[in-house]
Structure formats: structure tokens, C-alpha cells
Image (spheres, rainbow, N blue to C red):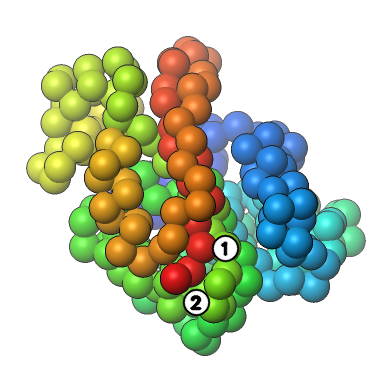
Amino acid sequence: MPQQNTWENEYKNPQLTQDSEEPREDVKKFLKYLRREQNISLENLHILDLGCGTGKHTNYLAELGAHATGIDISSRAIAIARNRALKKGYIVDYHVANIGASLTFIDNSFGLMLDVMCSNSLNEDERMIYLEETFRLLSPDGHFFVRILAKDGDRHAKNLLKLHPGKEKDTYMNTDMNLIERVFSREDFCELYGKFFKINELIKKTNYATFKNQPYKRNYWIAYLQKK
């Protein structure tokens, strides 16, 4: 599986991922939104972190009292996540799994799901499975946080689309990692994700991504979704 090999190598010799155990501020803000505006308690809530990496968000949710589950395609990342949870005394359920394939969890298992930059490299067939599975696994009225690459106003993305175009719409080849990535316009994101979820918030945010110690200005969509 080429994508699995790519991520195994990434977690062995990080170029894109950061080895921080501190959750993203975007995720913290979303969790505050759930508590304050949706009146949702994280304590004992069943949560699935898709593409959890080394577990910084999964372990944080466990710290807050949630029943946290994390999945990732990289066995190396999962091993690191399990070790960090063990050291901190957190009970977290970690599995090696591909988010672009059918998952083994039962229907309506989770009240909250997270996709923090994990679905950018899915192809169209995998993305449809991912959407069908997230919809199946999310409980009625459950919430889904998505952080994904934005096309709108992103010069770096548009340059990559021109120089290294992929075969599918709005995809380019990350030649350093041998990885295809997809960027979304607002219209395309709403059309695709809106088939499955109610879009409560969709915010465009600009940050700097670091690759090989070189910062790049990138745009992202921050989406607060809810099962219809």
C-alpha cells in the first residue's frame, strides 16, 4: 500500500508532521463551541479521531474525560500514540486502519468525530467511502470537525496545481513525499459534504505549514458539521 509506506516513512523521518503533543487551537475552539453553544459535555462522550497520527488530539480528549478512539494508517504513529497515552495514564482505544476503506465499528457509535488534515490525500473513490463511513458511524445529531486544505485565495496551492497536477479534480502531487493532495473551493466543499452533513460553520483560515523546515502560507477550511 503506497500511501501507508509514505506515512510510515513520514513518522520515521518527519518532514511535514510536527512532533508536538499540544492540540491545535482550532480543535480547542471547536470543543469550546460544543460545550458553550451546543451544550454538549465531552465527559463520557464516544469520540473517533480519524487519522489520529501520534495521538495529540485523541489523548487530549481522553484527558477531558471522553471515551476516545484513534485510527491511523501508520502503525508507527499508532505505536507512538499508545505509548504516550500509557505514560500519561489515559485509556485510549487505538487501531491501525485506513479511513478510505470500510471500518469495523458499529453504526452510530460516536457522538463526535474529528478529521484534522487526515483526508487530504484520499482519491475520489476513497473519499466517498470515507464520507459514507463517517455518516454511518456518527450518532444522530452527532458532530464532525473537519480541517482541510482550501483552494480559495491560496497561491501556493494554485501554483502546485499548475506545476504538478494530479489526475483528479483540484489535486496535485507533493513530489517530495510522493503523495497526492486535494484542495477544495468553498463551493465544492459545501456540495460534497453537504450531501451528508449540515454545515453549521465553515471558516477559511490562513496558517503557515512547515515542510522540511521551510514555512509555506496555506489556507484551510475549518468546518463544524452535524449529522442530518
Q: Residue at the location (63% across, 38% down)? A: 26
Q: Which residue is mark 1?
A: 143
In terms of secondary structure, where does tag 2 sit? helix
Q: Residue at position x 38%, y 36% from top?
A: 149
In the figure, is residue 143 to the left or right of 124?
Answer: right
Characterize the local packing of mark 1: few (<14), some (14-19) or many (20 or more) Cα atoms within 10 angstroms.
Answer: many
Res. 137 mark: 2
Residue 102 picture quarter: bottom left
**Residue 1 in view, yes or no:** no
Q: Is residue 209 left or right of residue 102?
A: right
Residue lying farthest to the front in this orientation? 37
**Three-letter amino acid code of the residue under disc 2:** Leu
Q: Are marks 2 and 1 in contact (CB under 8 Å)?
A: no
Is residue 90 at all visible to an observer of this figure?
yes
In 3D space, how far apart are the residues under numbered discs 2 and 1 (Cα atoms)?
A: 11 Å
Which residue extends farthest left?
Answer: 167
Find residue 88 and report its horizontal and vertical position in percent: 87, 54
The residue positioned 74% from the left and 64% from the top of the image is: 40
Q: Is residue 43 left or right of residue 207?
A: right
Residue 154 location (% of width, % of height): 33, 20
Circle 2 residues within 10 Å: few <14, some 14–19, many ≥20: many
Look at the picture and state if 184 lies above or below 8: above
Q: Residue at x 48, y 36 (%)?
A: 203
Q: Amino acid at mark 1?
A: His
Residue 202 image offset from top left, x and y in percent: 46, 42
Quadrant the N terminus occupies: bottom left
In this picture, residue 113 sits left or right of residue 84: left
Q: Position of residue 44 (x, y in %)?
A: 80, 73
- Between label 2 and label 1, give the one nearer the viewer: 1
Q: Secondary structure at mark 1?
A: strand
If the image is split into quadrants, where does the C terminus sit?
A: bottom left
Which residue is more in the foreground, 60 or 143? Answer: 143
